[in-house]
């Protein structure tokens, strides 16, 4: 069992682009958090006694949790699970929640990694995204965090409508000035059901320019690799020794537990997802009725996921691994589908593995979809 993901479904306000499950009201907060601890207890057997390597507080906005609430979660995990010494314990946080006192409190406790949602250092962009923090808060937060945490990550978003290459360059220079050991950077996407989706549909905001987003991605990769970061997953860059252990386990297909409303779990063959509704989740836990759905993945499904995650990472897709896990027919199919991309240098083969080239990294998801198995069972 690689780790435990805790989905904290509360936020101060809704970012315009976000399609994750969250609530901007704190109503029933204590009851929902207590129900999550009950879910942790009830599902302990799914770990099969294996050591938990990572604990990840995601959301939502986990930095809204009080020190006592974080303590209760971790005590519950230690009570019912075997936790590896030196396990990675990550808390996603927003800059407006991290004043110096809070940072010092976190640094003195079991949380040993922060993932900080900076997104931008430009005030107009933060306002356009409806972020709760300001540029000065982002700067003050990072100055304090870097002095007290060895392991932390910052999130950035690129491809924003109206932004220029020069502005993205300035954002990266500002981020690198804090020397974070890890940076996650994501292309803005317009998701249905979000405020941004409605704004674009009504013509109140321009849509994402894919060409600009790809230009931003190229500059991102060039800049961070030039600064000593390893581009170990499409959206993630880490200094050696500072890759996210939690996310790496996902990409390598390891089993994990997802706790809380909307959280997903994986045991190697089955996916399970909790209801994305705080009150339905709470009521089901209290009444002892199902609060999740599940799906048994077919061999084809698991092959497709191995291709998708492998092509996004620095480890690539192991050809012998595909043959051993899924059979020679899948390997023959993969090599046949990959040939046009090998010819166009969007993919390359090195020994036993298939990788996206520098040219193909931004297109990894599209390439992977063309390598998916759609007919064999």
Image (cartoon, grey):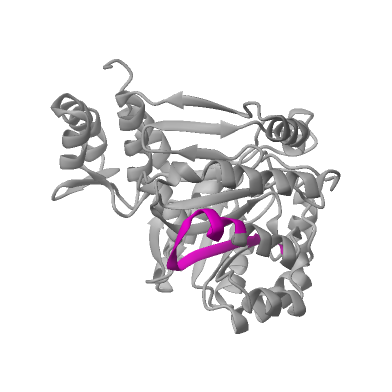
Q: Tell me: 11 left or right of 288.
A: right
Of 18 and 282, the residue lying toward us: 282
Q: Tell me: 309 left or right of 146.
A: left
Q: How far across and down, in percent of the image, does residue 129 sit?
A: 75, 50
Q: How far across and down, in percent of the image, does residue 279 sit?
A: 77, 34
Asked if residue 72 is among those painted magenta in the image, a careful observer would answer no
Q: Quadrant of residue 22?
A: top right
Residue at the bottom extreme, as displayed: 147
Q: Is 117 situated above or below 98?
A: above
Of 312 and 301, the residue lying toward us: 301
Q: How far across and down, in percent of the image, does residue 287 sit?
A: 71, 29
| Magenta highlight: main SS | strand
Range of the magenta residues?
76-94
Q: Quadrant of residue 9?
A: top right
The residue shown at (74%, 30%) is 280
Q: Quadrant of the C terminus?
A: top left
Asked if residue 79 is among those painted magenta in the image, a careful observer would answer yes
Of 250 and 280, the residue lying toward us: 280
């Amino acid at each position: 069992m690689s780790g435990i993901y805790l989905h904290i479904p509360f936020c101060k306000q809704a970012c315009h682009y976000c399609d994750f499950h969250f609530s901007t009201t704190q109503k029933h907060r204590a009851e929902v958090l207590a129900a999550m601890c009950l879910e942790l207890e009830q599902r302990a057997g799914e770990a099969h006694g294996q050591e938990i390597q990572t604990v990840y507080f995601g959301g939502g906005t986990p930095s809204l949790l009080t020190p006592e609430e974080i303590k209760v979660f971790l005590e519950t995990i230690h009570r019912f699970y075997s936790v590896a010494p030196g396990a990675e314990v990550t808390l996603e946080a927003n800059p407006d929640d991290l004043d110096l006192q809070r940072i010092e409190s976190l640094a003195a406790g079991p949380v040993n990694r922060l993932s900080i949602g900076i997104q931008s250092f430009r005030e107009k962009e933060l306002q356009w995204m409806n972020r709760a923090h300001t540029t000065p808060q982002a700067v003050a937060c990072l100055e304090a965090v870097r002095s007290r945490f060895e392991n932390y990550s910052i999130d950035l978003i690129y491809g924003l409508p109206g932004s220029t290459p020069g502005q993205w360059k300035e954002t990266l220079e500002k981020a690198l000035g804090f020397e974070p050991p890890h940076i996650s950077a994501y292309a803005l996407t317009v998701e249905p059901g979000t405020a941004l989706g409605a704004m674009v549909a009504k013509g109140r905001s321009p849509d994402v320019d894919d060409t600009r987003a790809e230009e931003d991605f190229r500059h991102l990769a060039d800049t961070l690799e030039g600064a000593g970061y390893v581009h170990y997953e499409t959206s993630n860059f880490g200094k050696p020794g500072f890759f996210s252990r939690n996310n790496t386990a996902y990409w390598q297909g390891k089993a994990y537990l997802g706790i809380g409303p909307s959280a997903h779990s994986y045991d190697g063959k089955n996916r399970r997802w909790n209801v994305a509704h705080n009150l339905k989740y709470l009521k089901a836990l209290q009444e002892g009725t199902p609060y999740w759905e599940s799906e048994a993945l077919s061999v084809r499904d698991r092959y497709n996921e191995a291709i998708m995650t492998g092509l996004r990472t620095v480890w690539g897709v192991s050809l012998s691994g595909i043959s051993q896990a899924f059979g020679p027919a899948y390997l023959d199919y993969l090599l046949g589908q990959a040939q046009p991309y090998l010819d166009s240098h969007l993919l390359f083969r090195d020994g036993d593995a298939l990788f996206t080239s520098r040219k193909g990294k931004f297109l990894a998801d599209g390439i992977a979809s063309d390598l998916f198995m759609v007919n064999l069972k």
